[in-house]
Image: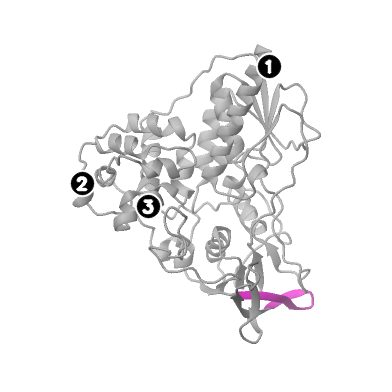
Amino acid sequence: MGDYKAFLTIPRKEAGYRPVHDRIHDFGEVEQTLNEGDRRLQASRCMDCGVPFCNWACPLGNKPPEWNDAVYKGDFKRAYILLNSTNDFPEFTGRVCPALCEKACVLNLTLHEPTTNRENEAAITEIAYRENFVVPVSPERNGKRVAVIGSGPSGLSAANRLNRMGYSVTVYEKREKAGGLLRYGIPNFKLNKTVIDRRIALMEKEGVLFCYGKSFTPDNLPEGYDAYVIATGTPTARDLRIPGRELEGVHLALELLSQQNRVLYGEDVSEEERVTCKGKDVLVIGGGDTGSDCIGTAHRQGCKSVTQIEIMPKPPVGPTDPANPWPAWPRTLKTSSSHEEGCVRRWNINTLRFLGENGKLTGVEVQPIDWEPDKEGGRPKMVPAADPEIIPAGIVFLAMGFMKPDLPEVADNVFWAGDALSGASLVVRAMASGHDAAQKVDHYLKSKVKA
């Protein structure tokens, strides 16, 4: 490292968010960027540890010490080459990854001020595009064809790897554009969709074919391919089948998020179909990232108020989590940019029923609860902690996660990847799964040649 003691004199500095009063009026990305000088200083804080836990913690095996050193020295071309060698799409993870590497950083474990790896990833990639360091490659073709079903992060990652191995790759996507969860689940204020379009255009220049409006199932795959990767994600959201579920105004979270993203790129949505929070009291059920995305979207649509409830207890306020010490993931309270924009947050709340008049939602009956240990060692039991109450609401979003798909038996030349294989997880883990699927396809097809 150029300055292996920089962490002693340079504190962690994040780029931060645009001011609330500015950002809630548009869907532009909320995160700001540091100037190049400050970014190089932040990269210099990386210690080049003897045992780099960051590398171990990253599902992709990213190597922050190497590319942070290149950034510190001002060699952004080398930094991008090192970063892109393990991470196909650092412009995605640089925006939406929870940065497992930073939780594992020695500076986090000792000072709670890890190196700004996630922001550094985004900066490296944007500079690489700006300076034309990102150029199409022309792989030598090996005569084999592979179909990838689904164009989310795992499908794109598998397609990119296979294409660069020399396979002719066709990506089939049932929707009108590529990206999967990146495009239809994550709001523009976290990931502008031009970032996805830019990468898809590069992949097309490198020879990857994209076919849209094509839906396939494991028992009905397109013909003429030597192998297949199924990366169709987790399409079924967890629902809440309680009285009043049929009322107008009760929606799954992706009904809001997906539609809003479509509206932003120009799709016409009729007044009857429009899911809007304008002038309404909004209730979000579910305390994760999807719920947070609903909160930010509700603000930008002009809601009256937002409340978010979670059935689980409130996590401890960080930076440490006594119940989950290193190397376990610290389940500490997360406050997102959307939460900062205004939201009532409540924990240990069970939803009993949706209330309405003339078929339209007016409120939700909920009840505070506690969790008691099971004397027989099973899962904790939910018990009432107070009388039921009513939260006024004109619209509700169910953001309680997704169901893991049941995988059918498939032929030997069919491989699974991403959330379809593991259940809902992180974008970075989906990309790693795409890498794994590509390796399995390559090993399978090469073994067939040898046989």
Q: Residues within 10 Å of mark 1 (few under 14, many from 20)?
A: few
Residue indicated by mark 2: 6
Q: Which three-letter amino acid code belongs to the residue tagged 2?
A: Ala
Residue 221 visible to the viewer? yes
Which residue position holds label 3? 32
When the figure is inspected, residue 356 is found, relative to residue 225, above or below; the finding is: below
The residues colored magenta run: 349-364
The crowd level at tag 2 (other Cα within 10 Å; few <14, some 14-19, many 20+) is some
Residue 299 falls left or right of residue 125: right
Quarter of the picture containing the C terminus is top right
The Cα–Cα distance between marks 2 and 1, rounded to whole angstroms, is: 52 Å
Choose top left, top right, bottom left or bottom right for residue 79.
top left
The disc placed on residue 440 is: none
> Label 3, label 1: how many angstroms apart (C-alpha)?
50 Å
Instruction: Please give the residue where the numbered disc 1 appears in the rendered image.
Output: 448
Q: What's the colour scheme? A: one colour
Horizontal side of 110 relative to 395 (left or right) equals left
Element carrying mark 3: loop
Residue 371 x/y as whole percent: 60, 75
Residue 268 appears at what percent x and percent y? 67, 51
Q: In which quarter of the image is residue 149?
A: top right
